[in-house]
Amino acid sequence: MYKLYGRKNAGSVCVQVLLEEAAVPYEMIWVENVRAPEFLQVNPNGKVPALQLPGGEIIYESAAMMVFLAETQPAASMTPKIGTAEHALMLQWIAMISAGLYESILRYFYPDRYGEAASVKSRASEEIDRLYGVMEAALAQKGPCLCGKQISAADVYLAMLASWYEPDMLAFGKKFPRVFAVYNLVAERPSWKKVAAANASPNSGSY
Ligand SMILES: N[C@@H](CCC(=O)N[C@@H](CS)C(=O)NCC(=O)O)C(=O)O
């Protein structure tokens, strides 16, 4: 069985949604302290998510999990056909979301880890909006989903990060209506609703 290590409303949400879409059995393990020695054995980077595969191997990095699950769980219908242009687009977006958007969001929420907090936060905020702007423009040309007509793992990944937007989703929807529509498409799915309910109670422990 898959084992997903996560924290409530953290980076594990998108992986949990894909596991739900695939309708595979999995155990959810809520991590209290990402710096605890026993969790560092799971992910030496001290971050969630981490995913133990049914064979026992543990992987980290959410982008890797999204691609792996999309491509190995056909029941989820979360990837365009491998080798198509749409599939290439999915890989592009997941790479940009992981390396660009997610990292900028981490700078925004943990600015003191990166330097002088106020300037890191404001620069990160600009970069987050710039990246959502890139997606908004692409969706205007090739939407309504990131890879065209069909929803994919890239949209689920995007929806999770969009749900963390500050000050709120109302502001997000005004600035980036097409990206907001992607978020809504994902948030309306039973998988997302089930995962949202499972993530509703507060985290215990701390980072
Ligand atoms: N690149 C990593 C980033 C994961 C990440 O930063 N996760 C956050 C939660 S959203 C975390 O565990 N933070 C704990 C910490 O940095 O102390 C991934 O995509 O899996």
Image (cartoon, grey):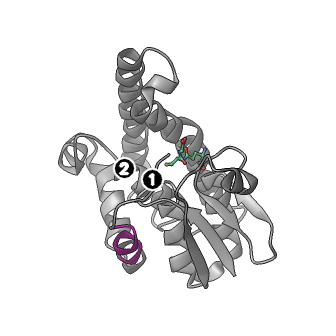
- Highlighted magenta segment, given as a residue range: 194-200
Q: Would you say 45 lies left or right of 103 here? A: right
Label 2 amino acid?
Answer: Ala
Q: Nearer the viewer, residue 77 or 20?
A: 20
Q: Nearer the viewer, residue 205 or 142?
A: 205
What SS does tag 2 mark?
Answer: helix
- Where is residue 56 shown, x and y percent of the image? 80, 72
Q: Nearer the viewer, residue 168 or 134?
A: 168
- Where is residue 191 shown, x and y percent of the image? 42, 77
Q: Nearer the viewer, residue 175 or 116?
A: 116
Q: Quadrant of residue 129?
A: top left
Q: Is residue 195 highlighted in magenta? A: yes
Residue 117 appearing in the image = yes
Q: Say which quadrant the N terminus sits in.
A: bottom right
Mark 2: few/some/many CA within 10 Å (<14, 14-19, 20+):
many
The residue shown at (81%, 76%) is 55
C-alpha gap between disc 2 and disc 1: 6 Å
Q: Which residue is mark 2?
A: 162
Decide: is 7 above or below 19.
above
Q: Is residue 74 highlighted in magenta? A: no
The residue shown at (42%, 50%) is 161
Decide: is 116 above or below 201.
above
Mark number for residue 92? none
Q: Would you say 65 lies left or right of 112 here? A: right
The residue shown at (59%, 52%) is 89
Q: Main secondary structure of the magenta part?
A: helix
What SS does tag 1 mark?
Answer: helix
Label 1 amino acid?
Answer: Leu
Mark 1: few/some/many CA within 10 Å (<14, 14-19, 20+):
many
- Where is residue 23 shown, x and y percent of the image? 56, 85
